[in-house]
Image (spheres, rainbow, N blue to C red):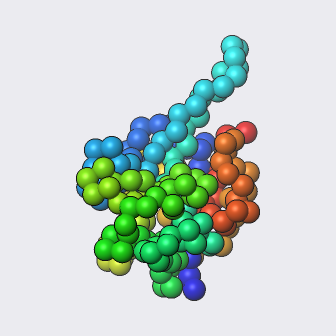
Amino acid sequence: MSQVGWIFDETRCIGCRSCFVACKSENRTPLRTDWRVVVERESGAYPNPKREFISLACNHCDEPACMKACPENAISKRESDGVVLIDQDKCVGCRYCVGVCPYGAARVDTDTNKVTKCTMCVHRLDGGLEPACATACVAGAIQFVEDFTGDPGEVPSGFSDPELTGPNVEFVLIP
């Protein structure tokens, strides 16, 4: 099975949030339901302050905790590309998947009260296009990878242990 994934290059991210806006627009998610977020953090002190931006979404894990926790079998992993999807017809909104995702990717849809998350724009993938967030990233910080074989490498502080689920994201961090 092929596995899609992300490369996020923090050294290129300028915090413009075009990825967030593109995701919201492309997927028409409700006002308070965000599939991609940009975390902004500050650290250090004068004369060496540090400001960082980290764009995060579902990592379409090798071993998705959300899929294992769903009592309705509403979550599946596509054989063709490894994209993890939630079947809205089967989801009952129990939120077990929200609680177990170590990356906070599963979100409650404020309109339906069911759980949703990044679909990696499967409608675009199926049409031969890249996810909207990667296409919209003006700095090239988010890269879509069709045959992801990497590993997260050094992860941002606060990111859960990749050994838990095998997230398909690679980080390039500011030294």
In percent of width and height, residue 67 lies at 53, 71
Residue 11 percent across, percent down from the top left: 60, 42
Q: Quadrant of residue 63?
A: bottom right
Quarter of the figure that contains the N terminus: bottom right
Query: Residue 62 lies in what quarter of the image?
Result: bottom right
Looking at the image, residue 144 lies above or below residue 137: below
79 on left or right of 63: left
Q: Residue at x 58, y 72 (%)?
A: 68
Report the quarter where the C terminus lies: top right
Q: Is residue 53 above or below residue 67?
A: above
**What number of labels is visible?**
0
Residue at left 70%, top 62%? 164
Residue nearest the observer in this picture, 17 or 85: 85
Location of residue 158 in the rendering, given as x and y in whole percent from the top left corner? 67, 42
The spot of residue 163 in percent (x, y) is: 73, 63
- Residue at horizontal 51%, vertical 61%? 96
Image quadrant where residue 109 sits: bottom left
Q: Report the front residue among 5 and 82.
A: 82
Q: Nearer the viewer, residue 55 or 129?
A: 55
Q: Is residue 26 visible?
A: no
In this rendering, is residue 90 above or below 37? below
Q: In the rendered image of this protein, does residue 32 appear above or below residue 72?
A: above
Q: Residue at x 59, y 49 (%)?
A: 9
Is residue 169 something one can see in this rendering? yes
